[in-house]
Image (spheres, rainbow, N blue to C red):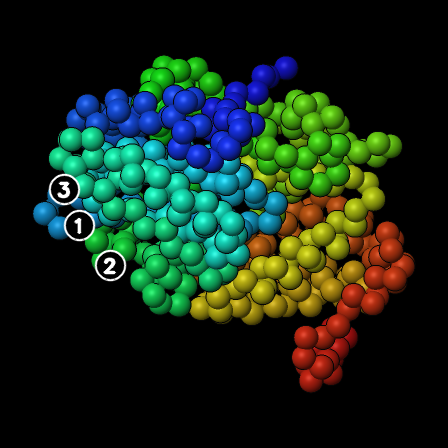
Amino acid sequence: MTDLTPVLSATWGAEKSWTLDTYTNHGGYSGLKKALAMEPGDIITAVKDSGLRGRGGAGFPTGMKWGFLPPDDGGPRYLVVNADESEPGTCKDTPTMLYSPHTLIEGVVITSFAIGCSHAFIYVRGEIIHVYRRLMKAVEEAYAAGHLGKNIHGTGYDLEVTIHAGAGAYICGEETALLDSLEGRRGQPRLKPPFPAVAGLYARPTVVNNVESIASVPAIIDRGVDWFTSMGTERSKGMGFFSLSGHVKNPGQYEAPLGITLRELLEMAGGMREGHQLKFWTPGGSSTPIFTDAHLDTPLDYESVGAAGSMLGTRALQIFDETTCVVRAVMRWTEFYRHESCGKCTPCREGTYWLELILKRLEAGIGTQADIQQLLDTCESILGRAFCALGDGATSCVTSSVQLFKDEYDAHVTQGCCPFDHSASALFTYEDESDAPAIEEARV
């Protein structure tokens, strides 16, 4: 059985773990001390050699992303930390910032020094005001200790850090929508190219990284590349958070090497809730195709999960037992995506709207076999045609659930109700009652 490897979470249980004193007493900022004595290019090389891949979901090599920045032209360049965590089931960055904000701040300073940035931004989800306040306090402590500001530790390096609270839009988790929001515009995805590395924040070269990615940098510099590469798999190096939620005895954050399996994680979490068994689960949040108990032994690394037909994503493992209606769960996720669509492109704006209506009909027991096929056709019309990844992500749970649980969809049609809850018909309402006649005519 794989052991847990607490690195980012190592001090979470310490008294007042969020303070500078606690962090420093546990070896905090030793990585920064080493980094400031290195050449910036050597730091980038170390991160490349470590194999650290973006922990925000895409899994793109972090050091390679830094290397995409054009040569220094004397103008400003920026680091933007994407802390707008909002994917359903994803809950790893928020506790990191809450219990150990200095881990992130140290990573910000090292990364900024490596890429030649003198002003970094941390974009925090607006609803988590308690995390925003804790980060602000941690930044204040870092300034007072000389880790931020002018002439950091006598090296001549200057860095300002700004904590920015968003207004609570899921779309701002997309890096270019986040940049537009940070500039004071409506948060909507930009056309690419140009990519942020060339023209990002204020049209200047910009690195955008996830909280966990940046927070992993200090340990790599402090403990070395060999230490980091000793964990994980050949192509998915290091450790990461696996967020278990749902029908498990002990939900929570499990920091373990990439490549661990759900079977191992469930053992650590005490198993499924008493008297129940696993039905389906998400390997990387609701925007990734779902898995079943047949995938219990699939290594949770980027390559293995991809080969099995899903994506590792943010490692948000939502666990559902046999009491859960797949159609209802997918409907709830689709309601979220429809609500959070920015409306910029037609496939996502209109497609998620119709997906929600069709799923509501099916869940209420008034759907038809044609509705099931229409779900798949609508997903095909969205996939690869939306302006950003939100549209593609919204189709993942729909198509995978129909593929794996077609009999359950059929039962909603043949039985005229949800097999799990006969009161489900109360769920079906039209958002706009004026749409009802046209929608019912289209259904018939």
The residue sitting at 31% across, 62% down in the picture is 183
Q: Quadrant of the C terminus?
A: bottom right
Q: Please, is residue 398 above or below residue 159 in the view?
A: below
The residue sitting at 57% across, 20% down in the picture is 4
What amino acid is at disc 2? Tyr
- Asked whether residue 346 is in view, the answer is yes
- The first of marks 3 and 1 along the sequence is 3
Tell me, yes or no, whether the two marked residues, 2 and 1, touch with CB atoms within 8 Å. Answer: yes
Q: Residues within 10 Å of mark 3 (few under 14, many from 20)?
A: few
Looking at the picture, how far across and down is residue 51, in whole percent?
Answer: 37, 26
Q: Quadrant of the N terminus?
A: top right
Between 178 and 349, the residue placed more toward the observer is: 178
Residue 279 quadrant: top right
Q: Please, is residue 24 above or below residue 245 in the view?
A: above
- The first of marks 2 and 1 along the sequence is 1
Element class at badge 3: loop
Judging by the rendered image, the residue that carries numbered circle 3 is 71
Residue 212: assigned label: none
The residue sitting at 51% across, 33% down in the picture is 16
What amino acid is at disc 3? Pro
Q: Is residue 329 left or right of residue 288?
A: right
Tell me, yes or no, whether the two marked residues, 3 and 2, touch with CB atoms within 8 Å. Answer: no
Judging by the rendered image, the residue that carries numbered circle 2 is 202
Q: Is residue 40 left or right of residue 8?
A: left
- The first of marks 3 and 2 along the sequence is 3
Between 370 and 198, the residue placed more toward the observer is: 198
Judging by the rendered image, the residue that carries numbered circle 1 is 76
Q: Residues within 10 Å of mark 2 (few under 14, many from 20)?
A: some
What amino acid is at disc 1? Pro
Looking at the picture, how far across and down is residue 142, in whole percent?
Answer: 32, 38
